[in-house]
Amino acid sequence: MAASFDLRFDCGRICLDLMATTGRSAERLAGPEQLAAWLVGAGVVPGGAQLGGVDRGWVVRFRMLRELLRRVVHDELRGRAADGDLRLLNAAAAAAPVPPARAVRADDGALVRALAGPPDCAGLLAAVARDAIGMLTDAGSRGQLRQCEGESCSLVYLDTSRGRRRRWCSSEVCGNRERVARHRRRATHRGDGAAAAAAEGVVDGAPVAGVR
């Protein structure tokens, strides 16, 4: 199986995980190998799917859908998406049938999901587009949509936390950056305070020798 390429699958929906393949000037769908890894990791196809047909053309088409999703989701968070973008999303969802799945026996006897045949690009794009339509037309899911509060982070996720108080796409990534930044601001503030006190001739409440 291909490497993870730092792909993320923690946004709560397949369509949001596709949007997370870019950000902070990082391109995680750089080529066919990365796209194949994403398709399996996001659950669009099962692990044993035949993905030999994935090529640069697939990558371009998935990037185009990603940009469309980015516009639609962000515009819906701010108000409403453009009618033209909704037509494009609906067209992508209807362009091809979603690859049919079937239950087969694994070597250990457990039932696993498999595709009836090699998937095509249009069918997989349709599966992701339909996931987005399902999310945007479900009131419960829409109410959980959040944009990360991390500085310069544009990722969107579903907030399923207790109390709906999740602030970051990832506590370990953006959350940790915010905590580090907060610590640095406090340290800088304390340093500025000490410098000001020294300038006044006082350190820890006592006069500095030689200063009058």
Image: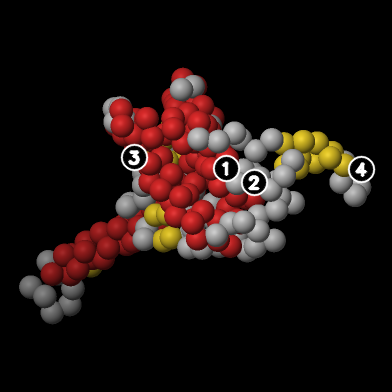
Q: Residue furthest bottom?
A: 210
Identity of the amino acid at label 3? Arg
Q: Earlier in the sequence, mark 4 or mark 2?
A: 4
* Residue 52 horizontal/vertical position (percent): 65, 58
Q: Secondary structure at mark 3?
A: helix
The image position of residue 90, as x and y in percent, is 44, 30
Callout 4–callout 2 Cβ contact below 8 Å: no
Q: Nearer the viewer, mark 1 or mark 4?
A: 1
Residue at image x 58%, y 53%?
38
Residue that badge 4 annotates? 109
* For residue 97, above or below residue 209: above
Q: Are marks 1 and 2 in contact (CB under 8 Å)?
A: yes
Gap in angstroms between the C-alphas marked 4 and 2: 25 Å
Name which residue type carries label 1.
Leu
Q: CA distance from mark 1 to mark 4?
A: 28 Å
Residue that mark 1 sits on: 124
- Between label 1 and label 3, give the one nearer the viewer: 1
C-alpha distance separating marks 3 and 2: 27 Å
